[in-house]
Image (cartoon, rainbow, N blue to C red):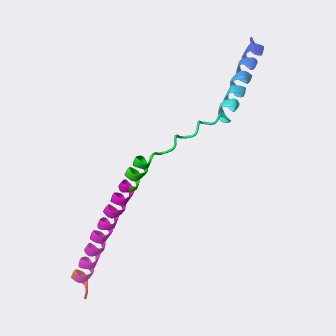
Amino acid sequence: MKKALVMLSAGLLIGAIGASYARLPAAPAKTDAEKAAEAEKADAAKAKDAAELAKAQDKAVANYKKHKK
């Protein structure tokens, strides 16, 4: 019984090591439409971030002017 348990655990260990070295297949190449959509999303996110930054800066300036001695 003990020998069977040792062999089973050794087999599981070997399987886990083998699985850790397995590689996933390469992702398919993106089409021009997918690249364009991704670029458009990035531009929209960049514009949104810029707008939020400008709003925060305006708020900070207004707070500074309000509490200026």
Is 58 magenta? The answer is yes
Residue lying at the far front of the rendered structure: 32
Q: Is residue 25 above or below residue 61?
A: above
Q: Position of residue 41 (x, y in %)?
A: 36, 54
Q: Residue at x 65, y 34 (%)?
A: 22
Q: Residue at x 40, y 55 (%)?
A: 39
Image quadrant of residue 10?
top right
Q: Position of residue 55 (x, y in %)?
A: 27, 69
Q: Which quarter of the figure is the N terminus placed in?
A: top right
Q: Is residue 22 above or below residue 42?
A: above
Residue lying at the far left of the rendered structure: 66
Residue lying at the far top of the rendered structure: 1
Span of residues in magenta: 40-65
Q: Position of residue 45 (x, y in %)?
A: 35, 58
In the figure, is residue 30 to the left or right of 12? left
Image quadrant of residue 40?
bottom left
Q: Which quarter of the figure is the C terminus placed in?
A: bottom left
In the figure, is residue 32 to the left or right of 28? left
